[in-house]
Amino acid sequence: MSRTARPAVEVVGVVAALKRHLTPGPVPTEPFRMILWENIGYLVDDPRRRELFDGFEAAIGLDPAAIAAASDNELLPLAKRGGMRPETRVERWRTIARIVRTQAAGDLDAALRALPLAKARALLKTFPVIADPGADKILLFAGIAPRPALESNAVRALARLGFFQEQASYDRSYKAAIAVLVEGGRPDGAWLIEAHQLLRELGKTTCKRGEPICAACPVDGLCAHAAVKAL
């Protein structure tokens, strides 16, 4: 890969090319549901996550009070469907419900919209498994703050496409990837959500962590390695 980063403005063209070939599945956009979605299973793919989420909704309901009132006998069988450490998952569900009830008066969406952005991000990061990338995603998808957000598969894909050099820590790589969208992307929320989902799908399907499947990649001709091979 070339050590010279490609111009950030080219990211718009990459996203447009991905849109012609990839169709990411639907995901929740309401903050409480998004947090529960992230905590519904352990290392499960998107179709399985949807199945677990829908099963939880049917059995318990997507309401903090209902989760708080549910017994271990109701929650544990659902948690076991989501992989290892089901007891930890039950505890996380209870923690999510407790935070929404005690710190957001039962309505997380309304609470986030009423807070300054920095405090809204801080509140989101008190939830299980929600760090900076997760908080950014929730604020973007819920329409609270139209700022870039990316998931780890998307960060890896942008680095391999040549937009930045991977850094020693994931936090620094994430910030470098976000800077690409800030400098070269579009500022509207709809485009940023599209970029998040399409770049994530690219990283999950072809630009995989181990061995990328370049022959099947819809933007292989735009990738940094293609430019290197042409020299």
Image (tube, helix red, strand yellow):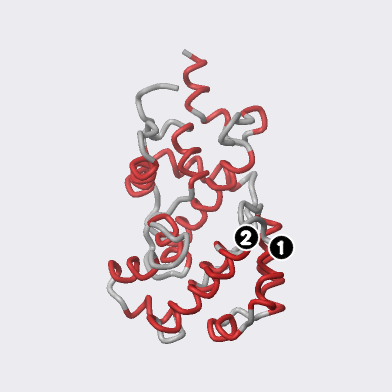
User: Residue 221, image x and y in percent?
Assistant: 56, 28
Depth order, front residue of 8/82: 82
Is 114 left or right of 134, judged from the image as shown? left
Q: Amino acid at mark 2?
A: Gly
The location of residue 113, given as percent across then percent down, is 36, 77
Residue 69 x, y percent position in the rendering: 58, 86
* Mark 1 in CB contact with mark 2 (< 8 angstroms): yes
Amino acid type of the residue tagged 1 in the rendering: Arg
Marks 1/2: CA–CA distance = 8 Å
Seen at 64% across and 47% down, the residue is 22
From the viewer's perspective, is 68 left or right of 144?
right
Point 36% across, 30% down: residue: 5
**Disc 2 target residue:** 41
The x, y position of residue 110, in whole percent, is: 41, 82
Q: Quadrant of the N terminus?
A: top left
Quarter occupied by residue 46: bottom right
> Foreground residue, 190 or 92?
92
Q: Is residue 63 left or right of residue 9?
A: right
Res. 217 image quadrant: top right
Tell me which residue sits at (43%, 77%) in the image: 99
Q: Is residue 67 above or below residue 188?
A: below
Label 1: few (<14), some or many (≥20) within 10 Å? some
What residue lies at 41% left-to-right and 62% top-to-bottom?
135
Marks 1 and 2, the one that precedes in the sequence? 2
25 relative to 75, above or below: above
- Circle 1: element type: loop
Question: How many tags in the picture?
Answer: 2
Mark 2 Cα shell of 10 Å, populated few (<14), some (14-19), many (≥20): many
The numbered dot on residue 81 is 1
